[in-house]
Structure formats: C-alpha cells, structure tokens
Image (tube, rainbow, N blue to C red):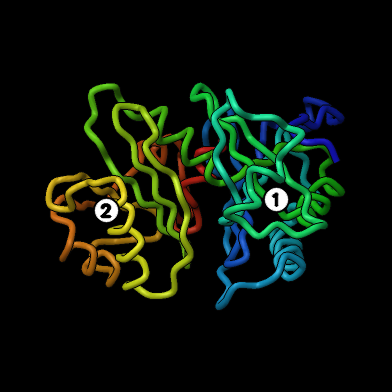
Amino acid sequence: MTKKKKNSSLNIADKNFKKLSIQVSLNGLSFCVADTVSQKLLISDRVDFSEEKNPMFVKDELQKLFQKHDIENMQFDEVIAVHRNTLFGLVPKSLFNQNHLNEYLKFNTRVLANDVLAYDEVENHELVNVYVPYTNINNYIYELFGEFDYMHNGTVLLQSLLNNQTQKQETTCFAHVNKNQLDITVLNQRKLLLYNSFKYNTKEDFAYYLLFVLEQLELDPKTVKVKLFGEIEEDDEIYQLCYKYIQNISIFEPSSSQLLKLGETSTSTIDFTLINTI
C-alpha cells in the first residue's frame, strides 16, 4: 500500500466533497464525516475500550462502527487515518534519512521485526515524525476506499499548535488528554521545546508526568502557563490534582473546534486531532 496518495478513482459528481477522518488507538477509536465545502460535520461517532486491546480487535471494532453508519458504502473525496500511540520519535529534517527509520526508534520504542515503519513531515517546521502505524487497519481502509492519507496523531497536534502559536507568546505547556494517554507539547514563540507522549492509569501518574516535564525543562510550576485540552474538564480529578501544584493552569479551547458547523452532532464524539484533519 502506498502512503500519501489521493483516491482519484471517484467521479467528482459522486463525491459531494465529503471527507472521512478516522482516529485509531488501542484504547478506542473515532471517526467523523464532514462536508469540506460548507465545513459542516455530517456524522461522528466513537468507541472507548475498557482496557487496551490489540490491533486485530481494534480493526474489528472499526468495521462494526463503519457498518453501523453504512460508511463502507459511501464515497469520499478524501480519506485520512490518524494513528494514536506512543511508538514514535521526532527527528530534525536535516538529519533525517528515510532508509534508516528503525535507527530513530530502536532506543526509545519497542519495534518488532514485522513492524512497518512510516514517517510524516511536520509542515513548515523542519521536523520528521517517525512512527509505527497499525498496518492491519491501514489495509482494511485501503480495501474499502483505495489510496488514502495516514499520519500520526503527534504530527496533527504539532502542526496545529505550532501554526496557531504567535512569535510573541511566552513558553506554554499544552497537555492533550486522552483515555490513558497524555501528549505534552511545550512551545516558546513558535519553537518546539518538547513533544512527548505518556501512558497513564491514575491521576497521580498524570500529574507526575506533567510535573516531570516541567522539571526537565526547568520551568517553574508557579509561573509557567499550562493548558489542558481534550478529554478534561475543570471538575475532573486530574485537573483538581494538577491545580494543587501548578498555579497557572487552565482548560484550553482550541479555536479550530469552532470551524465546523456541528448541527445535530454531539461534540463529545469529536476529537481535537480529527477536527484538525478537516
């Protein structure tokens, strides 16, 4: 299967400019269908798993979800899949060689012999994200729709946050919260200081990783701006615990979430990374 090619086999009259965005992880999955001309969200849904599953289980659940909404029989102008996991590594573009993908991951990620590696370029920021996609899910999507785009959720996060940061903004720590996964991005005036992802099980795990990152970057929890977004609210136990240690913490509402006309669709089914692929 070839990456990063558009599905050009459909007649434009049949497309209706619909885009399918899918996010997959071992903790759950979600998707949305949007009209890219009117910026209207047509369908969205998600499934959360009680515990981390394997890629074969996730593929079967995605198939059930598609069948529930008759997605398999629809035609799309564009299809994109986002793989969310902690199996990645960032490489400066000047040092990147696509023939040595395994070398970039072998010291900080468990890469199996049969894993297929992929990479994304972080647009306009001279970075390459090397990662392990879920190949069986890519194959399933390819069987349905032909050639499509896929990328890592870290690439989506970085591009969105970096592109919306201004040159004058002070150092800010963004923490994207998903079930059992915390993605931390620290920016200073559109410069990336750190991006990393952690698996957590308890609120104490979450607070530990967040404070650990601040400590490693020598950022003062009493003054640094920390913005949480994703599956988090101010009355959550995680937020309340972090608030005890971090004075300048708040819930971040990305402006991109306002770009879509949600209509009858519940916002609870829409993930930040999905919205930013539309």
Quadrant the C terminus occupies: top right
The answer to whether residue 186 is seen in the rendering is yes
Identify the residue at image location x=22%, y=46%: 219
Identify the residue at image location x=65%, y=46%: 131
Quadrant the N terminus occupies: top right
Identify the residue at image location x=43%, y=58%: 182
User: Can you give x and y, in whole percent of width and height, for residue 125 in the image?
Assistant: 49, 25
Query: Residue 99 versus residue 46: which sits nearer the camera?
Result: 99
- Provide the residue designation for mark 2: 215
Q: CA distance from mark 1 to mark 2?
A: 31 Å
The answer to whether residue 79 is seen in the rendering is no
User: Can you give x and y, in whole percent of width and height, for residue 246 in the image?
Assistant: 18, 57
Query: Residue 105 versus residue 201: which sits nearer the camera?
Result: 105
Q: Quadrant of residue 111?
A: bottom right
Q: Quadrant of residue 12?
A: top right
User: Can you give x and y, in whole percent of width and height, for residue 112 in the image?
Assistant: 75, 60
Identify the residue at image location x=35%, y=36%: 255
Label 2: how many residues lie within 10 Å, few (<14), some (14-19) or many (20+)? few
- Provide the residue designation for mark 1: 133
Query: Residue 257 versus residue 34: which sits nearer the camera?
Result: 257
